[in-house]
Image: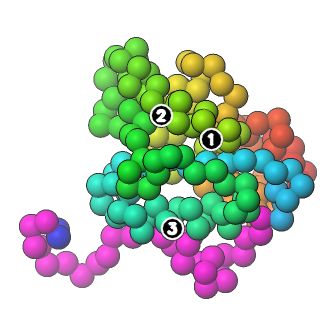
Amino acid sequence: MKKFNIPHKFEFITIIELYAQWIREGKLKVNADWNKDLNIKFTAQDPCNIVRKTQGQKMADDLRFVIKSIVGEENFIDMIPNGVNNYCCGGGGGALQAGFPEQRRAYGKTKFDQIVTTGATYVFAPCHNCHKQIEDIGEHYGTEYHVVHIWTIMCLAMGILGENERAYLGPDLAEFGL
Protein backbone atom coordinates (compact mmCIF):
# COMPACT_ATOMS: atom_id res chain seq x y z
CA MET A 1 0.00 0.00 0.00
CA LYS A 2 2.90 2.34 0.70
CA LYS A 3 4.55 1.41 -2.58
CA PHE A 4 1.48 2.29 -4.66
CA ASN A 5 0.27 5.10 -2.37
CA ILE A 6 -3.04 3.36 -1.63
CA PRO A 7 -4.88 5.10 1.22
CA HIS A 8 -5.55 2.88 4.22
CA LYS A 9 -6.46 3.27 7.86
CA PHE A 10 -4.52 0.42 9.42
CA GLU A 11 -0.93 -0.28 10.35
CA PHE A 12 0.95 -3.48 9.59
CA ILE A 13 2.46 -4.68 12.85
CA THR A 14 3.94 -8.03 13.76
CA ILE A 15 3.55 -10.01 16.94
CA ILE A 16 7.26 -9.41 17.63
CA GLU A 17 6.65 -5.66 17.73
CA LEU A 18 3.71 -6.23 20.04
CA TYR A 19 5.78 -8.47 22.34
CA ALA A 20 8.46 -5.76 22.53
CA GLN A 21 5.85 -3.08 23.23
CA TRP A 22 4.08 -5.15 25.88
CA ILE A 23 7.36 -6.05 27.61
CA ARG A 24 8.43 -2.39 27.64
CA GLU A 25 5.04 -1.36 29.02
CA GLY A 26 5.11 -4.07 31.68
CA LYS A 27 1.99 -5.74 30.27
CA LEU A 28 3.86 -8.92 29.40
CA LYS A 29 5.72 -10.02 32.50
CA VAL A 30 8.76 -12.04 31.48
CA ASN A 31 11.84 -12.89 33.47
CA ALA A 32 15.15 -14.32 32.23
CA ASP A 33 16.19 -15.55 35.68
CA TRP A 34 15.24 -19.11 34.71
CA ASN A 35 18.37 -19.14 32.49
CA LYS A 36 20.76 -17.53 35.00
CA ASP A 37 22.30 -20.76 36.23
CA LEU A 38 21.66 -22.81 33.10
CA ASN A 39 23.47 -20.31 30.83
CA ILE A 40 21.89 -21.82 27.73
CA LYS A 41 22.95 -19.84 24.67
CA PHE A 42 20.53 -18.61 22.02
CA THR A 43 20.86 -16.93 18.64
CA ALA A 44 18.26 -15.55 16.21
CA GLN A 45 17.45 -15.78 12.54
CA ASP A 46 16.34 -12.52 10.93
CA PRO A 47 13.62 -13.57 8.46
CA CYS A 48 13.94 -12.00 5.03
CA ASN A 49 10.32 -10.91 4.70
CA ILE A 50 9.80 -9.18 8.04
CA VAL A 51 13.31 -7.79 8.50
CA ARG A 52 15.07 -7.12 5.21
CA LYS A 53 12.09 -6.72 2.89
CA THR A 54 9.55 -4.82 5.01
CA GLN A 55 10.16 -3.70 8.58
CA GLY A 56 13.92 -3.19 8.51
CA GLN A 57 16.38 -2.84 11.37
CA LYS A 58 13.71 -1.75 13.86
CA MET A 59 12.19 -5.22 13.55
CA ALA A 60 15.59 -6.84 14.08
CA ASP A 61 16.15 -4.65 17.14
CA ASP A 62 12.71 -5.50 18.57
CA LEU A 63 13.42 -9.19 17.99
CA ARG A 64 16.68 -8.94 19.94
CA PHE A 65 15.04 -6.94 22.73
CA VAL A 66 12.38 -9.63 23.18
CA ILE A 67 14.90 -12.47 23.07
CA LYS A 68 17.29 -10.82 25.54
CA SER A 69 14.33 -10.12 27.84
CA ILE A 70 13.39 -13.82 27.95
CA VAL A 71 16.79 -15.56 27.94
CA GLY A 72 19.11 -12.91 29.42
CA GLU A 73 21.34 -10.56 27.49
CA GLU A 74 24.42 -12.56 28.47
CA ASN A 75 22.89 -15.69 26.93
CA PHE A 76 22.26 -14.20 23.49
CA ILE A 77 24.93 -14.63 20.81
CA ASP A 78 24.24 -12.71 17.64
CA MET A 79 25.11 -14.04 14.21
CA ILE A 80 27.53 -12.06 12.11
CA PRO A 81 26.28 -10.44 9.98
CA ASN A 82 22.87 -9.82 11.53
CA GLY A 83 19.77 -7.67 11.24
CA VAL A 84 19.12 -6.30 7.77
CA ASN A 85 22.50 -7.70 6.69
CA ASN A 86 21.87 -11.25 7.91
CA TYR A 87 22.01 -14.14 5.46
CA CYS A 88 18.90 -15.78 4.05
CA CYS A 89 18.37 -19.32 5.32
CA GLY A 90 17.40 -20.58 1.87
CA GLY A 91 13.96 -21.90 2.84
CA GLY A 92 11.68 -19.12 1.65
CA GLY A 93 10.22 -18.27 -1.71
CA GLY A 94 8.80 -21.77 -2.13
CA ALA A 95 12.20 -23.46 -1.78
CA LEU A 96 10.94 -25.82 0.94
CA GLN A 97 8.20 -27.13 -1.35
CA ALA A 98 10.06 -26.91 -4.67
CA GLY A 99 11.36 -30.47 -4.66
CA PHE A 100 15.10 -29.70 -4.81
CA PRO A 101 16.29 -30.48 -1.28
CA GLU A 102 19.95 -30.95 -2.24
CA GLN A 103 20.12 -27.47 -3.80
CA ARG A 104 18.19 -25.90 -0.91
CA ARG A 105 20.50 -27.51 1.63
CA ALA A 106 23.59 -26.47 -0.33
CA TYR A 107 22.36 -22.88 -0.30
CA GLY A 108 21.49 -23.20 3.38
CA LYS A 109 25.03 -24.33 4.25
CA THR A 110 26.04 -20.67 4.64
CA LYS A 111 23.31 -20.21 7.26
CA PHE A 112 24.24 -23.48 8.93
CA ASP A 113 27.88 -22.40 9.25
CA GLN A 114 26.79 -19.01 10.57
CA ILE A 115 24.65 -20.65 13.28
CA VAL A 116 27.32 -23.15 14.31
CA THR A 117 29.89 -20.35 14.61
CA THR A 118 27.79 -18.74 17.35
CA GLY A 119 28.02 -21.85 19.52
CA ALA A 120 24.36 -21.37 20.47
CA THR A 121 22.30 -24.37 21.52
CA TYR A 122 19.02 -22.81 20.36
CA VAL A 123 18.01 -20.77 17.32
CA PHE A 124 14.95 -18.52 17.40
CA ALA A 125 13.27 -18.63 14.00
CA PRO A 126 10.18 -16.38 13.87
CA CYS A 127 9.31 -17.42 10.31
CA HIS A 128 7.81 -20.84 9.53
CA ASN A 129 9.98 -21.30 6.42
CA CYS A 130 13.14 -20.31 8.32
CA HIS A 131 12.17 -22.60 11.19
CA LYS A 132 11.78 -25.66 8.98
CA GLN A 133 14.83 -24.89 6.82
CA ILE A 134 17.12 -24.28 9.81
CA GLU A 135 15.84 -27.44 11.46
CA ASP A 136 16.40 -29.40 8.23
CA ILE A 137 19.93 -28.15 7.54
CA GLY A 138 20.84 -28.86 11.16
CA GLU A 139 19.69 -32.47 10.78
CA HIS A 140 21.27 -32.77 7.33
CA TYR A 141 24.68 -31.41 8.31
CA GLY A 142 24.56 -33.05 11.72
CA THR A 143 24.58 -30.63 14.60
CA GLU A 144 22.84 -30.46 17.94
CA TYR A 145 21.15 -27.05 17.92
CA HIS A 146 17.41 -26.81 18.39
CA VAL A 147 15.06 -24.43 16.56
CA VAL A 148 12.44 -22.71 18.70
CA HIS A 149 9.56 -20.30 18.46
CA ILE A 150 9.62 -17.11 20.51
CA TRP A 151 6.38 -18.01 22.26
CA THR A 152 7.75 -21.29 23.62
CA ILE A 153 10.69 -19.67 25.41
CA MET A 154 8.55 -16.68 26.38
CA CYS A 155 6.18 -19.07 28.17
CA LEU A 156 9.19 -20.60 29.89
CA ALA A 157 10.21 -17.08 30.98
CA MET A 158 6.73 -16.58 32.42
CA GLY A 159 6.71 -19.97 34.14
CA ILE A 160 3.71 -21.20 32.16
CA LEU A 161 5.17 -23.57 29.56
CA GLY A 162 3.00 -26.68 29.56
CA GLU A 163 4.20 -30.25 29.33
CA ASN A 164 2.67 -30.66 25.87
CA GLU A 165 4.61 -27.66 24.51
CA ARG A 166 8.10 -29.10 25.08
CA ALA A 167 8.32 -31.65 22.27
CA TYR A 168 11.00 -29.90 20.24
CA LEU A 169 13.11 -28.62 23.13
CA GLY A 170 16.43 -30.24 23.89
CA PRO A 171 16.97 -32.42 26.95
CA ASP A 172 18.35 -29.39 28.81
CA LEU A 173 14.91 -27.69 28.68
CA ALA A 174 12.36 -30.44 28.00
CA GLU A 175 11.59 -30.93 31.68
CA PHE A 176 12.79 -27.61 33.07
CA GLY A 177 10.37 -26.06 35.54
CA LEU A 178 8.02 -29.05 35.75
Residue at the disc numbered 3: 62
Q: Mark 1–mark 2 contact, CB under 8 Å? A: no
Sequence-wise, which precedes: disc 3 or disc 2? 3
Magenta region includes residue 7: yes
Specify the segment rendered in magenta.
3-32
Number of numbered callouts drawn: 3
How crowded pointer 3 is (Cα within 10 Å; few <14, some 14-19, many 20+) is rated as some
Question: How is the rendered protein coloured?
Answer: rainbow
Question: Is residue 46 a member of the stretch shown in magenta?
Answer: no
Give the secondary structure at mark 2. Answer: helix
In the rendered image, which residue does mark 1 sit on? 118
Q: Residue furthest bottom?
A: 25
> In what element is the residue under mark 3?
helix
Q: Amino acid at mark 3?
A: Asp
Q: Which residue is mark 2?
A: 111
Q: Residue at x 68, y 38 (%)?
A: 119
Residue at horizontal 32%, vertical 76%? 11
List x then y, in percent, for residue 44: 56, 49
Residue 25 higher or lower than 68, as above or below: below
- Mark 2 residue type: Lys
Compared to residue 107, the image places residue 76 above or below, namely: below
Distance CA(mark 1)–CA(mark 2):
11 Å
**If you read the primary sequence from the N terminus, does the residue marked by circle 1 or circle 2 appear first?**
2
Between the residue at mark 1 and the residue at mark 3, the CA separation in whole angstroms equals: 20 Å
